Image: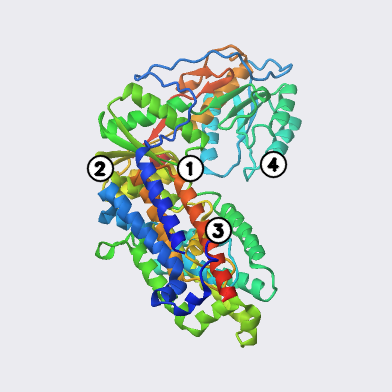
Amino acid sequence: MKKIILASLMSLSLSASFAHAQSPWTGGDDLPTNPLACDGTAGTVAAKPYDGGEATNAPDRKGKTIKVVDVPKLVGIGYFNATSKGIADAAAEMKTMDAKTDGPTKANIDDQITLIDNYITSGVDGILFAANDPVAIAPVLKKALAAGINVVGYDANSTPDARQWFVNQAEFNGIAKSVIDNLAAEIGEDGAFAIVTSTFTTPNQARWIAEMGAYQAKCHPKMKWLETVEAQEDNILSFNQANTLINKYGDELKGIVGMTSVATPASADAVTQAGKCGKVAVVGLATPNAMKPYVESGCVKSVVLWNPVDLGYAAAYVLRATADGDLKPGATSVKAGKLGELKVINGSEVLLGSPFVFNKENIGQFDF
Amino acid sequence: MAFADHPTARRSERSLLHRLYSAYGQEAVILVAMVALFVIVGLINPRFLSPENLNTIFSGNAYIAVAAIGMAMIIITGHIDVSVGALIGVLATISGTLAVAGYPVWVAWLVPILVGMAVNALVGAMVAYARIPSIVVTLGMLSILRGGLISVTGGAWISGLPKEFLIAQAKPLGVPAPIYFMVILTLAAAFWMRYSAFGRSLYAIGGNPEAARASGIPIERRTVMVFVIHGAFAGLATLLFATQLQIIQSTVPPNLELTVITAAVIGGVSILGGTGTVIGSTLAAILFAAIGSALIFTNVSAYWLRAVIGVLILVTVLADMIRRRRQGRA
């Protein structure tokens, strides 16, 4: 038994000493990064040929009132209530779109396919969708295209050839720029910060972190990135990790970045309970509902995400432009009402624009 | 076999240390490991031992420690519960919903404990009287609770909790409330397990059910009761889990049930039933938090946490088997 005690002691001390020599992990991935310009100018877009589908023998719909159905992942939740409000707003503004939202009550791909199939049979001019499964939804969308229906996706893509366009809510480098710029504004150009993420292998988070590192090195070189810690999708662990960061770095730590809707509020709670509001800034990616208590108390000033109302609004305008024949393969931009000119990226995607920053003034208007 | 060459004769002259060791062996191992960890990491970075960080470490896994008390009892009795994570999620949602709806906070605290007891009374009855293995019953319960939670909440989070509801944020005398809960409940349960007839009968049931039955222990009733008590601890763990932050998620930490079971097993509870203490499971839960914090203080990837816990599980189970083999030969 002594040997067992010895063995466990040795493994503990070994891991502790190795450890000290290692540099902290960043939590980013190794893919190439494409940081945006430090000012507001648009980033470079690698040219890519159109890879979307075509609506076969679509009738001339230019200027005519079109019947559109919006099929989100599910209905009855705040996020998709917001996208369908955006679509309704756009339709009301255009006066030539008759749009309605009809989606499954659970995020179920089979229900979604059945619904779309029914609308193809009953006859619509356009379909907007947010796919529950990019591959499984493809056949029914191709059926719609074959029937001459215009198909545009938003929020969650299908395989590209199963729809004409997809409205992309945010690119990784855009989110990264917004997070780092807001952080710099709060902690100063020479502030030190740490990141709380889910796991180092979660694809989206790893991509955001890699882009954040690249953008910070390029545009805010004096900021000090202390380390990245993992907290799974575990709220109490996120809280503990944020506390440990505060304990470890003391006054040196000026900001914590949360990478998920779990990590960001838990970090904000750690800062609140440690009495460090105003001393340690929390910036992060999270849904507004998760962040309301902290934003309203003033402990958190900026939460980065996109605006789902704008996303629905843009999707409706992209569908209108497609039906009118104004948005054709090879186009580089499209007009989207009050949002102005939106860029075409990745062959057949339309980029919504800069991410949206939720703050004390606007967060009350959102419920998702 | 490293231990096979111990002369049998020496066993008769066991010292007090040996006897203490055979009763609290695993607890001692964890305690020594924990002290070593505090010394080593404290030398590398003295901030590790700051009062704030000690508070973080000792309160960080308090809810896991409280849930592991009930889990240790279940495993000692020869059963297992893989649904406790989902149960804590459901109870947290019930608690938060009541608190937001304006019920007095004591109702919001008490109801989840009662619901936890009721749910587990059902589980215990199916295990004891219908004789369905506990792993099957609790796997079923896991699906029911997890599915039900998502259906009912629709994934929405609860916010706007009243300040007085957030009991885990209280700090009487500068010490976080979860630490009081953990220490008091662990000690109470440990005394009860060691000195009450009921508590001792659990070891008998887990160690040898037929012998326990022959000696007149009402196995079925005791089994239901131990599940009910486990449900109460799940409810108490929920109190700490649900009131630590200002929002309640509709999901629970992934693999929470496994973390709770792991705490019990590393704490020295034999997965085969019959041995172990709740002091061990609580020490193990604290050790997890200490290792997690130490990894950050020494700049090691968090992946080591899993590796270290994995090694601990293997070492513990190995030690348990060796101990059993020696007892079998004695």
Q: Give how far apart the Cα atoms at labels 2 and 3 are.
A: 36 Å
Please say if A284 is above or below B172. Answer: above
Q: Which residue is mark 1?
A: A368
Q: Nearer the viewer, mark 4 or mark 2?
A: 2
* Label disc, if present, on residue A278 of the rendered structure: 2
Provide the secondary structure element on which disc 3 rests.
Answer: helix
Query: Residue at 25% of width from left, 42% of height from top?
Result: A278
Cα distance in 3D space between marks 4 and 1: 22 Å
Gap between marks 4 and 2 measured at Cα: 48 Å
Task: Tell me the quadrant of the picture where the C terminus of chain B can be found.
Answer: bottom right
Expressed as whole percent of the image width and height from the top left, the position of residue B136 reads 67, 63
Residue B34 drawn at (x, y percent)? 37, 59
Residue type at mark 2: give it: Gly
* Whole-number angstrom distance, CA of label 3 to CA of label 1: 24 Å
Please tell me if label 4 and label 3 are on a single chain: no
What amino acid is labelled 1 in the image? Phe
Return the residue nearer the eye: A176 or A363. Answer: A176
Q: Residue at x 48, y 42 (%)?
A: A368
In the rendered view, does A189 fall on the left or right side of B83? left
Q: Which residue is mark 4?
A: A111
Check disc 2 and report its element: helix, strand or loop.
loop
What chain does mark 3 sit on?
A: B
Q: Which residue is mark 3?
A: B86
Of the numbered discs 1 and 2, the one sitting upstream in the chain is 2
Nearest the viewer among A122 and A344 is A344
- Are dots 4 and 2 on a single chain? yes
